[in-house]
Image (cartoon, helix red, strand yellow):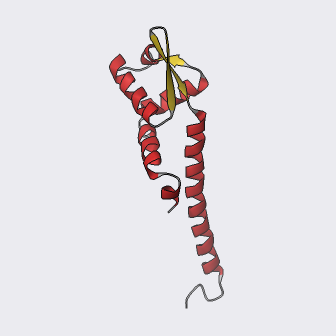
Amino acid sequence: MVVDLLGAEWADRVFHALADPTRRDIVVRTLESEHSVSALARHYPMSFAAVQKHVAVLEAAGLVTKRRKGREQLVRGDVGTVRRASRLLDALEAVWRDRVDRMSEILAEPDGGTP
């Protein structure tokens, strides 16, 4: 199966992390530029601790990295992980397109694909 070949555990972590709109927004912001967790927290109607938890989920999925600069934790998006997720979706789409193409071929047969 395609998902197994591309790392099912990894895919589960990434797509679980991306399932939340706040986390998707954090990924977009941190792909554009590095942000401190406190700067990120100012963008959302939730506590600093809640934003920290979102960042931790993204970090566990490899979608962001954190580094310490003085007292701040700076967060940067990881474009490599985003590209890997994109390749997984492309592979799944290829499976789907192949299946549709095969159905089209069967339906185009003179007998309509009946044995």
Vertical placement of residue 78 versus 87, above or below? above
Where residue 78 appears, x then y in whole percent?
56, 32
Q: In this view, does 50 lie to the left or right of 82?
A: left
Locate residue 114: give its quadrant: bottom right
* Residue shown at 43% from the left, 38% from the top: 17
Vertical placement of residue 92 versus 114, above or below? above
Where residue 26 appears, x then y in whole percent?
48, 27
Quadrant of the frame with the C terminus: bottom right
Residue sitting nearer the eye, 12 or 42: 12
Tell me if residue 59 can be seen. yes
Tell which residue pokes out farthest to the bottom in this image: 115
Tell which residue pokes out farthest to the top in this image: 70
* Residue shown at 46% from the left, 45% from the top: 10
* Residue shown at 45% from the left, 43% from the top: 15
Count of numbered labels shown in the rendering: 0
Residue sitting nearer the eye, 113 or 67: 67
* Residue shown at 59% from the left, 68% from the top: 100
Where residue 110 appears, x then y in whole percent?
66, 87
